[in-house]
Amino acid sequence: MASVKKQPARAAKPAPIKRRDRQRTRQEILDIAFEEFAENGLSGGNTDAIAARANITKRLIFYYFNSKEELFTAVLEMAYAEMRAAEEDLHLEALEPEAAIRRLAEFTCDFHQAHPQFVRLVSIENIHRGRHMASSRRLKQMTQPSISQIAKVLERGEAGGAIRPGIDPIELHMTLNALSFFAVANRHTFEAQFASDMSSPKAKARRRAAIADLLWRYVRKD
Amino acid sequence: MASVKKQPARAAKPAPIKRRDRQRTRQEILDIAFEEFAENGLSGGNTDAIAARANITKRLIFYYFNSKEELFTAVLEMAYAEMRAAEEDLHLEALEPEAAIRRLAEFTCDFHQAHPQFVRLVSIENIHRGRHMASSRRLKQMTQPSISQIAKVLERGEAGGAIRPGIDPIELHMTLNALSFFAVANRHTFEAQFASDMSSPKAKARRRAAIADLLWRYVRKD
DNA sequence: CTCTTAATTATCCAACCGATTAATTGATAA
DNA sequence: TTATCAATTAATCGGTTGGATAATTAAGAG
């Protein structure tokens, strides 16, 4: 009842963020916007909801990112940056060709399975014909190490005779991503149609093994 | 100036549809709603725009389909029905196992490439976690012939020794669809990242051949 | 010709939502 | 202390949009 500071009085609030910290606020907005956009899409994503969940005013979102579109682009950039970072911890150069191919396949499957929201975000960006990615220099460049890693494995495998010649690293990357991505992105329509389990740990593990197999069968010399 | 009928006076209108025809009006709405939803998604799709392009009042949309969601579900049903219909014209039973597998692969690639709006619609439905498909009996059933067709080819191939045993028809269907679907659905983010052409007729044909190859390499006995 | 029913239109609205204006407050340096 | 500037809030606005109410009109039956 007495005139206390308003802040501590609200017991139900979910731990107010430290304010007046540019980095922190920006990051907080990005994290929550990622969830919001991955969940509801670009037109479905709501800036009011982001502001509410971030415990800030909607105006702040526009203060840091000028528009909803730019916020979405920033979210995309962050999401891809995180994936590429994880990808760099693979050390395929230390492995035999077959082991390297299998490890790459397993890593990709694991990443997509572990980050369905990333998969959703990429789907959404494709619905928008990749226009945010196309307009971001950062996003377009982020990708090169990924391919050269594969190229080296293929070269090594060809030289050693384990892998057949003429395989395009970009095509291999596409094939792997298609298989791995689909298993998460199209899970719902596929499960609905075929009453096929794609979500249980067991099913995921089986599919992961099948994809690694398929990829190896495709590149090996025979 | 004189009191003429209002209808013929509007010269600029784009050929008014024959009205008072339940079937025709319904179908017209469906066709245009398909375009609208495939283009802009569920929340992005606009009922006003649909009405305008169909030269009807928005109220009519709600008269035939009670809500935007139900309209979307009806659109999905139509889209899948058309694909399954095309699928039935394949006659895999008349072909040798290898030819059958390749033909199936090529058909699927061709269909997805020829119907990017269908691919987009399925992506969108997955963003919504397949909830419309899950709530439609028709949609869930529409799919069985597709799988049994594949199962027969596999059986025949196994018996004849051309195909290795133990391949699950649903898994094969998933693999093929993943490869074929991704080439259309994720074209934009992939092209933006890898400056890789996936849209020219040449690139499509090359990918189609690669997918058929990959599939056959996966199932053949060796 | 008229009665009934179903298809269609005209009009409106309340909620939502991205974006803006302007005021306020906290941190920092002089 | 105070002046300055950046971070944050409060309040609002204008356009959009799914959906509803109620009147109108065409088609077919008897």
Image: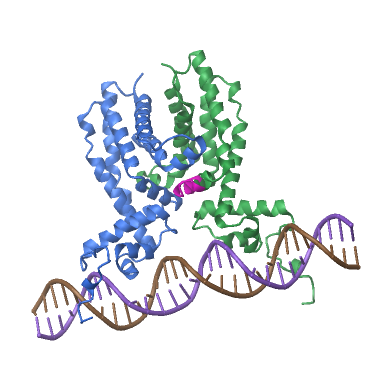
Chain colours: A green, B blue, C purple, D brown
- Is-magenta flag for residue A130? yes
Residue at point 54% right, 53% down? A37
Between B72 and A130, the one lying in front of the other is: A130
Q: Position of residue A100 (x, y in %)?
A: 54, 24
Range drawn in magenta? A122-131
Between B198 and A151, the one lying in front of the other is: B198
- In the picture, measured across the screen, residue A54 lies left or right of residue B156, that is right
Residue at point 55% right, 39% down? A140
Q: Position of residue B74 (x, y in %)?
A: 32, 57
Residue at point 22% right, 61% down? B24
- In the picture, measured across the screen, residue A87 lies left or right of residue B113, that is right
- Is-magenta flag for residue A217? no
As drawn, A117 above or below B149? below
Q: Quadrant of the C terminus of chain A?
A: top left
Q: Quadrant of the N terminus of chain A?
A: bottom right
Kindly report the secondary structure that dominates the magenta region of the rendered protein.
helix
Q: Residue furthest front?
A: B1
Instruction: Judge whether residue B134 can be spotted in this image.
Output: no
Instruction: Judge whether residue A127 can be spotted in this image.
Output: yes
Q: Position of residue A167 (x, y in %)?
A: 45, 23
As drawn, B212 above or below A98? below
Residue at point 51% right, 13% down? A160
How many labels were placed on the picture?
0
- In the picture, measured across the screen, residue B14 lies left or right of residue A49, that is left
Between B20 and B218, the one lying in front of the other is: B20
Q: Position of residue A14 (x, y in %)?
A: 68, 60
As drawn, A53 above or below B207? below
